[in-house]
Image (tube, helix red, strand yellow):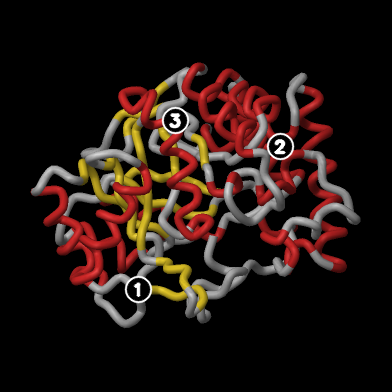
């Protein structure tokens, strides 16, 4: 497994991480033993970055990872997140500075560890200046409970405000061949500020796996209410996914491998975190690190499946948080 550094101040991690959300929510029932075996297989293959959050499965995902961490903590660069709260009141944002310490301590207890390597603000709380939240996070770094800080789905301005308070190792955002909005401002801001980039949903919520059909696309809760997976938008996106599969076949690769190789080719500061619950899919994904795309290959993809061709908008992060828009 190849490695990359997250930003100018962050940890060195595997070029591909493992997103663990789907092991606890969003994509239907899970075989937890297979999920644990998948995490172990990822670590055996040299993956070091494991990504979870306090909101995933309302804490269940952190407890799942604890089964592996108690045996293999030294093998893991552990990332978790706070700020999206799932409780009896529903799903809502809370990044008040006086709540940050409690959120971390609860995560540490669920994970069964004494510190986390990367602690993200999962979403900016519109009621709280990001500088105030990051200030509270910085206190946890000073105490040794957190090694590095990250933020997720910020604007370029919010990222600047965060960096002004404390070094930020990573910015997590949705980025794939199917969703490239972050290229307008946020990616360039991260690079200017020395912040690593961690794309989630790098396979377009499954669209770039080459396995979805018109009938199966909406079966998973995470896709069921996503405008990109309904009606004419889905038809268009499935046509484009077929083009990706055809180009991948020319490289003797799968759609997923081509899509991940495309992201890896965007720069050495990019560390995608594809999620999977199955060892077979994991093996397929990890092979992407050995697929090198030339400038001609990248130009061909740009022409064959241009950004503007993908149909449907995603949910708005400015909208009230719901189960649908709080991954």
Q: Nearer the viewer, residue 19 or 238?
A: 19
Circles 1 and 3: CB distance less than 8 Å?
no
Quadrant (top left, top right, bottom left, bottom right) of the C terminus: bottom right
Q: Looking at this rendering, what residue extends furthest in the left direction?
A: 142
Which residue is tagged 2? 300
**Label 2, label 3: how far apart the Cα atoms are:** 41 Å
Residue drawn at 32 percent across, 31 percent down? 5
At x 34%, y 33%, the residue is 77
- Which element is circle 3 on? helix
Residue pictured at 47% horizontal, 23% vertical: 43
The one of 158 and 148 positioned closer to us in this rendering: 148
Dividing the picture into quadrants, the one containing residue 301 is top right
Nearer the observer, 5 or 144 = 144
Instruction: Locate residue 136, reporting x and y percent.
Output: 17, 63
Give the residue pinned by disc 1: 94
> Disc number at residue 14?
none
Q: Is residue 202 visible?
A: yes
Q: Is residue 1 above or below residue 221?
A: above
Rendering coords of residue 235 (x, y %): 87, 59
Nearest to N terminus: mark 1 or mark 3: 3
């Amino acid at each position: 497994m190849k490695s990359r550094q997250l930003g100018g101040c962050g940890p060195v991690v595997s070029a591909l991480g493992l997103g663990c959300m789907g092991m606890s929510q969003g994509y239907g029932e899970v075989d937890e033993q297979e999920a644990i075996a998948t995490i172990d297989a990822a670590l055996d293959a040299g993956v070091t970055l494991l990504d979870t959050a306090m909101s995933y499965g309302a804490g269940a995902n952190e407890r799942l990872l604890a089964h592996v961490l108690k045996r293999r903590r030294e093998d893991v660069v552990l990332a978790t997140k706070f700020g999206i709260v799932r409780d009896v009141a529903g799903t809502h944002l809370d990044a008040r500075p006086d709540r940050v310490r409690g959120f971390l301590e609860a995560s540490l207890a669920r994970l069964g560890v004494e510190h986390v390597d990367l602690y993200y603000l999962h979403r900016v709380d519109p009621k709280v200046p990001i500088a105030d939240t990051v200030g509270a996070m910085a206190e946890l770094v000073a105490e040794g409970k957190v090694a590095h800080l990250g933020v997720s789905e910020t604007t370029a301005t919010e990222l600047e405000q965060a960096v002004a308070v404390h070094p930020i190792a990573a910015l997590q955002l949705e980025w794939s061949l199917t969703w490239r909005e972050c290229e307008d401002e946020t990616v360039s801001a991260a690079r200017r500020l020395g912040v690593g980039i961690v794309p989630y949903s790098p396979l377009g919520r499954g669209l770039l796996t080459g396995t979805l059909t018109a009938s199966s696309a909406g079966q998973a809760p995470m896709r069921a209410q996503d405008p990109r997976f309904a009606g004419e938008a889905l038809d268009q996106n499935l046509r484009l996914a077929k083009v990706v599969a055809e180009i991948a076949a020319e490289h003797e690769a799968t759609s997923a491998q081509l899509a991940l190789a495309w992201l890896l080719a965007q720069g050495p500061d990019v560390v995608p975190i594809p999620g999977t619950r199955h060892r077979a899919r994991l093996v397929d994904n990890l092979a992407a690190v050995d697929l090198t795309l030339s400038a001609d290959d990248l130009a061909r993809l740009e022409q064959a499946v241009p950004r503007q061709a993908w149909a449907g908008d995603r949910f708005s992060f400015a909208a009230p948080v719901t189960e649908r828009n709080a991954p």
